[in-house]
Amino acid sequence: MVECSPFQRLALSVDRMAPSQDPLFSGLGQAMRVGTDLLAALIVGGFLGWLVDSYVLGSTPWGVAVGLILGLVAGIRNAYRAAQRWEN
């Protein structure tokens, strides 16, 4: 028998699990993905705006505000694209 670490055993057992066919879990997964995409876009936009404010322009708080708005637009765009993929 081949020795494996507990992490390798866990990875192997997860690979063998059958995907859930329950529509409730599928819908929850899609909603979590959209929420995570939107949150990540806001965080990245706000962080980049903060960097612009702090190190480039020094125009506090306008860089953060613009970064958050651009992040929101990017997040909504990603959510729309994901919804289009699920519809097809």
Image (cartoon, helix red, strand yellow):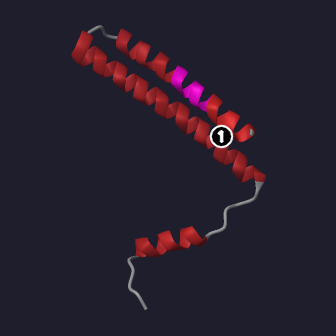
In x, y percent, where is residue 70? 47, 18
The magenta stretch spans residue 65 = no
The answer to whether 68 is drawn above or below residue 62 in the figure is: below
Q: Quadrant of the N terminus?
A: bottom left
Spot the residue most to the left: 55
In this rendered view, identify the residue nearer to me: 54 or 86.
Answer: 86
In x, y percent, where is residue 12? 50, 73
Spot the residue most to the front: 88
- Please name the residue shown 66% across and 67% down the image: 18
Disc 1 packing (10 Å; few <14; some 14–19; many ≥20): some
Chief secondary structure of the magenta portion: helix
Q: Secondary structure at mark 1?
A: helix
Q: Which residues are magenta?
A: 73-79
Amino acid at dot 1: Ala
Q: For this view, does 36 lie left or right of residue 25?
A: left
Residue 19: name its quadrant.
bottom right
In x, y percent, where is residue 39? 51, 32
The answer to whether 53 is drawn above or below residue 74 in the figure is: above
Please count the marks in the image: 1
Q: For this view, does 62 lie left or right of residue 26?
A: left
Q: For this view, does 73 lie left or right of residue 46?
A: right
- Please name the residue shown 29% across and 21% down the image: 51
Q: Quadrant of the C terminus?
A: top right
Q: Which residue has dot 1 on it?
A: 31
- Please name the residue shown 75% across and 59% down the image: 21
The magenta stretch spans residue 77 = yes
Spot the residue most to the bottom: 1
In x, y percent, where is residue 26? 71, 50
